């Protein structure tokens, strides 16, 4: 994992979560007695990665004050937006702080209890330029669904639907060759989910199935669910 840098998206405004956390950035929201971002960084450290770039924007000073220059042996760098660049634009901007061949892009407001080391191993075995972690959830209404063929090639992203039921969904983790991210336009807002990933469908992007709990804090409801699941009684996860 020495040739992989984690790039964690931490710059969102988190307007839906404001009733629950006030002016705090989402990644600092308290879950189980600690900032939610620590759970994401734990998966980075557990995988053996030694570098992470936090893509900050809203309340960037608070994030930097909370985490400083390292976490559990992981060197932390910061890529701060001066204007909103979207998820894709933030990833493109952070490449100035990435020296490795591979980038593991991760959402800062969700975490999957799966091995990132195993994800990376399966990605390398596939020979792909880009892989997305997919997780099966019992009720996929809050998520966009991911469809892929028997070989794992992603064939379609399906928008959120009001139809209940289990499905494979985006786990918010991507392993991508750095040079592929260089194709993202610089200096303007770009959506990873709406613009970049769909352009990789049908060839470049492979799905890696993960068996693990997906926790996100994007809404007040999911935040409360995360707090119940990862509260003091359940340990630190």
Image (spheres, rainbow, N blue to C red):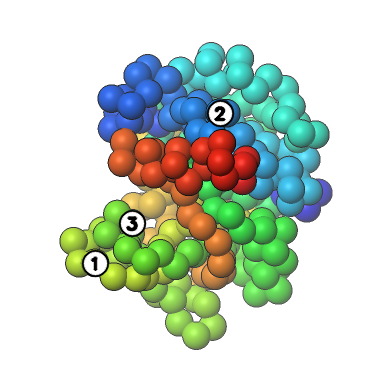
Q: Of helix, strand and loop, which one carries label 3?
A: loop
Q: In the rendered structure, which disc, 1 or 3, sits on the residue that comes first in sequence? A: 3
Residue 196 picture location, percent across and down = 42, 53
102 displayed left or right of 231:
right
Q: Which residue is mark 2?
A: 33
Residue 10 picture location, percent across and down = 50, 32
Q: Residues within 10 Å of mark 2 (few under 14, many from 20)?
A: few
Q: Residues within 10 Å of mark 1 (few under 14, many from 20)?
A: few
Q: Which mark is residue 143?
A: 3
Q: Of helix, strand and loop, which one carries label 2?
A: loop
Residue 182 picture location, percent across and down = 56, 47
Tell me the distance, in whole angstroms, between the alpha carbons under discs 2 and 3. 26 Å
Residue 133 picture location, percent across and down = 53, 61
Please identify the residue farthest to the left as the structure is shown. 162
Q: In the rendered structure, which disc, 2 or 3, sits on the residue that comes first in sequence? A: 2
28 displayed left or right of 129:
left
Q: In the rendered structure, which disc, 2 or 1, sits on the residue that comes first in sequence? A: 2
For residue 40, say whether it is visible: no
Q: Which residue is mark 1?
A: 164
Q: Of helix, strand and loop, which one carries label 1?
A: loop
Residue in the image at 18% along x and 61% along y = 162
Tell me the distance, in whole angstroms, between the alpha carbons under discs 2 and 1. 32 Å
For residue 87, which quarter of the picture? Answer: top left
């Amino acid at each position: 994992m020495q040739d992989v840098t984690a790039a964690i998206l931490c710059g969102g405004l988190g307007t839906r979560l404001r009733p629950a956390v006030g002016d705090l950035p989402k990644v600092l929201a308290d879950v189980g007695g600690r900032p939610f971002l620590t759970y994401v960084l734990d998966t980075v450290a557990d995988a053996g990665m030694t570098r992470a770039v936090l893509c900050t924007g809203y309340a960037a000073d608070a994030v930097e004050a909370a985490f400083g220059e390292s976490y559990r042996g992981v060197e932390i760098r910061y890529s701060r937006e001066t204007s909103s660049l979207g998820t894709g634009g933030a990833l493109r901007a952070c490449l100035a702080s990435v020296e490795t061949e591979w980038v593991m892009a991760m959402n800062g407001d969700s975490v999957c209890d799966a091995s990132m080391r195993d994800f990376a191993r399966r990605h390398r075995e596939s020979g792909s330029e880009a892989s997305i972690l997919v997780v099966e959830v019992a009720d996929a209404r809050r998520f966009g669904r991911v469809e892929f063929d028997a070989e794992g090639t992603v064939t379609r992203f399906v928008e959120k639907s009001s139809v209940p039921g289990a499905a494979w969904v985006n786990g918010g983790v991507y392993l991508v060759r750095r040079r592929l991210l260089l194709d993202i336009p610089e200096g303007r807002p770009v959506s990873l989910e709406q613009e970049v990933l769909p352009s990789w469908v049908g060839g470049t992007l492979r799905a890696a199935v993960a068996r693990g709990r997906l926790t996100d804090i994007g809404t007040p409801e999911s935040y409360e669910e995360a707090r119940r699941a990862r509260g003091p009684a359940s340990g630190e996860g």
